[in-house]
Image (spheres, rainbow, N blue to C red):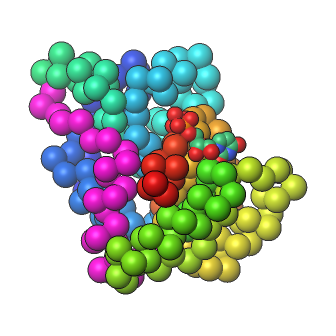
Amino acid sequence: TVLPTAPVLDLPVHLSGDYTASLVHLVEAGRGGHVVTLNAEMAMLAQREARLARIIRNADLVVPDGAGVVWALQRVGRKIRRCAGIDLVEAAMGPLARRRTRVFLLGAAPGVAESVATLWRERYAGLVLCGWRDGFFGPEDTEALTDELRRCQSEVVLVGLGVPKQEYWIEQARQKLPDIVYVGVGGSFDIWAG
Ligand code: UDP
């Protein structure tokens, strides 16, 4: 099913009554994709960063994170509720665990993603935390990282490198591994790790 969109600052936001279900469907479809949780800062940045705007327009699911984005939609008569990215990803883990989804965690300082993997393995029985890596790597590590994502058969990669670094990383990763669903999660790993 293709979701309708409404524009915010010329960027398409998908209109869904259940963003968690939309994300899970994207994973189930098995054809990969990019999920963007759009807030005001990111929308503003996209006004001067053409590359970021293009990536958002090409994303498969753009979720209204951020009160400003929701306000802009409601102002033009759209019935929409805010969906914070951090809550969306957490809510999806239960259903994704039930289908034994393979999830890779990429980003934050060394040790953080690993802590999240340890916590989630307990919390979401069935979820396959197939790998993790901190977000402080150079271009020379890109090939090894792509190989790792392929080798561990990742279906979902949560990318927490901050905006817009994560979106740019996702754009190049999709060219090599298009069947993965990538979700930009900003600083969420730091929060999940506690
Ligand atoms: N980060 C990273 N690699 C970098 C720069 C930042 O992994 O090269 C991580 C950082 O440790 C933090 C997250 O990216 O966990 C950025 O968090 P922030 O709250 O700034 O995210 P944003 O507001 O951009 O969504």
Q: Is residue 183 visible?
A: no
- Residue 22, given in percent of the width and then of the height, sits at 28, 56
- Residue 183, given in percent of the width and then of the height, sits at 48, 53
Which quadrant is home to the N terminus?
Answer: bottom left
The residue shown at (45%, 49%) is 191
Q: Quadrant of ligand 1?
A: top right
Considering every residue shown, the one lying at the far right of the view is 140
Q: Is residue 126 above or below residue 59?
A: below
Q: Is residue 17 above or below residue 100?
A: above
- Residue 122, given in percent of the width and then of the height, sits at 39, 78
Q: Is residue 72 visible?
A: yes
- Residue 133, given in percent of the width and then of the height, sits at 67, 63
The residue shown at (44%, 77%) is 121
Q: Is residue 116 above or below residue 154?
A: above
Along the horizontal axis of the image, is 45 left or right of 3? right
The residue shown at (28%, 26%) is 67
Which residues lie in the magenta part?
A: 78-102
In magenta stretch: residue 161: no
Along the horizontal axis of the image, is 97 left or right of 186? left
> Residue 52's image quarter?
top right
